Amino acid sequence: GENVEQHPSTLSVQEGDSAVIKCTYSDSASNYFPWYKQELGKRPQLIIDIRSNVGEKKDQRIAVTLNKTAKHFSLHITETQPEDSAVYFCAAVYTGTASKLTFGTGTRLQVTL
Amino acid sequence: DVKVTQSSRYLVKRTGEKVFLECVQDMDHENMFWYRQDPGLGLRLIYFSYDVKMKEKGDIPEGYSVSREKKERFSLILESASTNQTSMYLCASSLWELGTGELFFGEGSRLTVL
């Protein structure tokens, strides 16, 4: 089955700096890669996703890049703000029959003033 | 706005008790999921269901069962709770199969087994 590794497990940045979270996956057939954000005490929510037919996707201050050859994808947050502090989860799945979404182990991002 | 509601936010049970965790969604989604969240281990899939009365095992189904008698309701059952089942349990629903589109999560049920 799919295995997703996520690094780092914790990340502290100063407000205004950029943050990068990296994930690698094992199944070369995986073709959908979402990112979820979970604020303290809240439910995880989808913030951005990318499919394997594109290499990069942006949404305001967040972007995701995908390198299919190396089997890794990354979340980039620019101009970080205190409200970006949360746990971020990457995930991967092959969107075929009987496939399951596999999550990474999470990255706790702390944005300090 | 999709709403996924888990009936209990906090539960404390004793070893050997039977535990029911209830989840209801209001968006007519076909697909529902139960995840377990533990620090350092991420979100792990316990069971999922893509239709009423249908269920499929996820990655860690041992010690759990599920029930889906109605489309909007998906229950997780611990037949005989054990201390290693102390965890946060998250229910989710999705319009898409097997989490290939957005998953809408409930707020979680934190279970402590003594």
Image: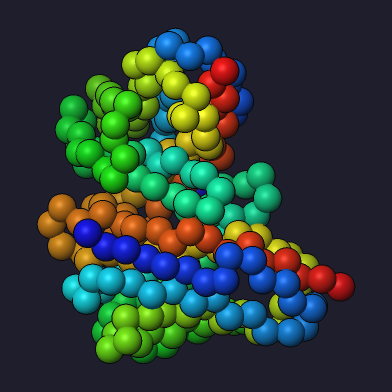
Residue A91 drawn at (x, y percent):
39, 64
> Residue lying furthest right in this view?
A113
Residue B66 is left or right of residue B13, and the answer is left
- Above/below status of A96 relative to A59: above
Res B20 seen here: no
Nearer to the camera, A1 or A63:
A1
Query: Residue at horizontal 19%, vertical 73%?
Result: A29
**Measured from the top left, where is residue B28 in percent x and y?**
32, 40
Q: Residue at horizontal 39%, vertical 47%? A: B44
Q: Residue at x 43, y 19 (%)?
A: B81
Number of numbered labels in the structure image: 0
The picture quadrant where one finds residue A8 is bottom right
Whole-percent x and y of residue B85?
A: 46, 29
Q: Look at the picture and state if B26 lies above or below A96.
A: above
Residue A24, image x and y in percent?
38, 75
Q: Quadrant of residue B24?
A: top left
Identify the colour scheme used.
rainbow
In the image, A74 versus B67, the foreground residue is A74
- Figure quadrant of residue A92: bottom left
| Viewer-proximal residue among B47 and B38 | B38
Q: Is residue B78 visible to the viewer in this orientation of the structure? A: yes
Q: Nearer the viewer, residue A91 or B75?
A: A91
Say which quadrant the C terminus of chain B sits in.
Answer: top right
For the point 44% across and 21% down, the residue is B82
